[in-house]
Amino acid sequence: MKNKEPRADLVFGEELGVAVGGVSSYSCDYKTADESIFPSRSDYRSYVDGIYMGYKWQCVEFARRWLYVNKGYIFNDVAMAYDIFRLRDVRDLVNNQTLPLNAFKNGSQRRPEAGCLLMWDQGGEFEETGHVAIITEVFEDKIHIIEQNMHFYSWPEGQNFSREIKAKVGSKGDYWLHCPSNDSTILGWVIQTDDPTHGVVLEAAEKELFNLVPCKVLSRAPIETPWLNLANEDESAYVDMMGGHKLSADISTAQTYYRMTQAAKGALESATDELHQMFLHATEYALEHPELLSKFGLPEAILKKIRVSWANRKNQLITSRFDFALSENGLKVYEYNCDSASCYMEVAKIQGKWFKHHGVKGGSDAGSGLFKQLVKAWKSCEIDSVIHVLQDDDPEETYHALFMKDAIEAAGYECVLVKGLASLRSTENGLVEDSYGNTIKWVWKTWAWETALDELRFDGKTQQKNLTGSIPTLSEVLLNDDIMVFEPLWTLIPSNKAILPILWTLFPNHPNLLNASFELTPELIESGHVVKPIVGRCGANIQLIDHNQNTLAHKPGEFEDRAQIYQQLFPLPLIDNLYVQICTFTAKGNYAGSGTRVDPTMIIGKDSDCLALQIGYEQ
């Protein structure tokens, strides 16, 4: 018997076949993509009727496009294909409503149906992503499927499906699909149905599992005993700032910590990964729509630089922080701090040492992996010289800068800490040098990008070369074309509150989002709403207003003259007289750890305490 000749792969974007339902499947061989046609990452985004489908020509893009064309609904954006198996609704774009989804494991007594999604888990031939296909026909002994990004050759002539998969029915009517590859796993199928019989029940569906539980350490004796290592510069600076060896500045909460379930941690991890991708999508959407970008309050002179930063450095984000409300009422994101977030050291290092000092057992430190993930993120960067850590002369920024310096050095790079700008000098060729004569090429900063932009606003000019030997301004350092800054300039967009209404427009009724608008709508008045300046820090100038138009909380600040957005009121849970916010941290856009911020008021601010967070108990 002769072996069949291998079929030739097609070039990226060439049609593999036309599926049932009249939707084309295309080659996703990125190695053959024409750079003149796809010069930047944004050119790979696929839209139908102005609606985002995914990246050309990946499996998720095809599944979403086929469903939209043939069913009129799409599923929400996901970080990885296998995440679709946990989705429980789709958006009907024709009738503007959500429809229920249910997932059924391979071997379920509920058989797959034509038009449902077939899901593979991560691993094997699908590495970290998993895979999704559409089932078009179901038989007793096989199914037919359509898909993208499985192979790059044409479907057989006259065939309107990509391949068939063997099936077998068990004695109880259980329907099993053979996985064509021994090193991958078929999770099952996802059907648009409101009948969950034989379906997968998600742990997170039990709402009480989202409730944080306050705990106390048993003994008061060790509280005054030193437990941070003063020989470590970052810990010594932290002790100096806190006025002692403590995690909480408030003596009344010195013994308090929180526990959350594995289910809650899983929900936070999934939400963090998915929301990161959604915020990036909204960032690109804003950059492509000038009428929306104008609402961000950015100087006109900086917009070109932001677009260049996005085009060239989209994948160079080291880390970021999400702020969540988590309770039995749901998991909702307030905002995304992509630029100059704080609390890294408290979560990655201090809370773990606090647990050890107090002998807390029974779970795991929610921030234990953060430092390791930060080191991994830094290692992925191709940095060819000294990294300068720039900070203002502020006690909190000092220990934060020292902590990040440790992560950078652990990644194998030489690092120099610079406090303030007085030690820097401009050179005759427009570069900047430190006091050791090192040319500054790579920077990680604690300063917010907005601080540099304020110099442009006040001066009314773009950055210009300073006199040789003079001290450069912050904008002259950070906006210097010869200096690469972390986090990149484009992080101004997702960190700005103007992104929130755009997100709600792109992903309406997403379970982790809150309704947000540039105008105060009747829906927001009815639900209660929060007024937020589009640019702000530490909760300044935020107002919480209930459905009766009563002001529940208001924090004054320096951003009262900024434009505002309006967001649905969703208060933090009040636990033992403290409002508790969950923060999750990313490394290269993926979940890397979590911690808490607490305050006796409804608004978390600069002086709000961090309390320790533990994972692993079950109610």
Image (cartoon, helix red, strand yellow):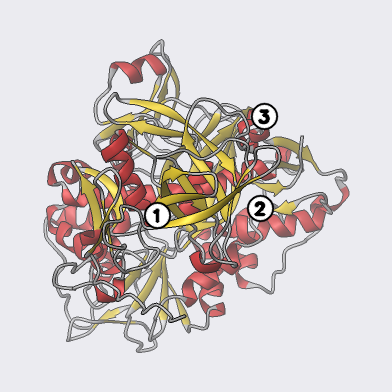
Report if residue 119 is visible in the image: yes
**Which of the pair 51/316 is nearer the observer?**
51
> Identity of the amino acid at label 1?
Cys
Residue type pointed to by label 3: Glu
Looking at the image, the residue that sits furthest to the bottom is 437
Residue 113 placed where, x, y %? 46, 38
Asked if residue 5 lies left or right of residue 356, the reply is left
113 up-or-down from 4: above or below: above
Most foreground residue, 550 or 156 = 156
If you read the primary sequence from the N terminus, does the residue marked by circle 2 or circle 3 appear first?
A: 3
Residue shown at 32% from the left, 85% from the top:
439
Farthest top residue in view: 548
Q: Are marks 1 and 2 in contact (CB under 8 Å)?
A: no
Q: Can you say which quadrant of the picture contains the C terminus?
A: top right
What's the distance in space between the residues labelled 2 and 3, CA to CA? 19 Å
On residue 500, the disc is: none
Whichever of callouts 3 and 1 sits on the residue coming sooner in the sequence is 3
**Residue 264: x percent and y percent?**
63, 41
Residue 434 in the image, given as x and y percentages of width and height? 35, 82
The answer for how far apart the CA atoms under marks 1 and 2 are is 20 Å
Q: Which mark is residue 208?
A: 3
Q: Which residue is mark 2?
A: 366
Mark sitting earlier along the chain (1/2): 1
In the picture of the structure, the residue carrying the numbered disc 1 is: 338
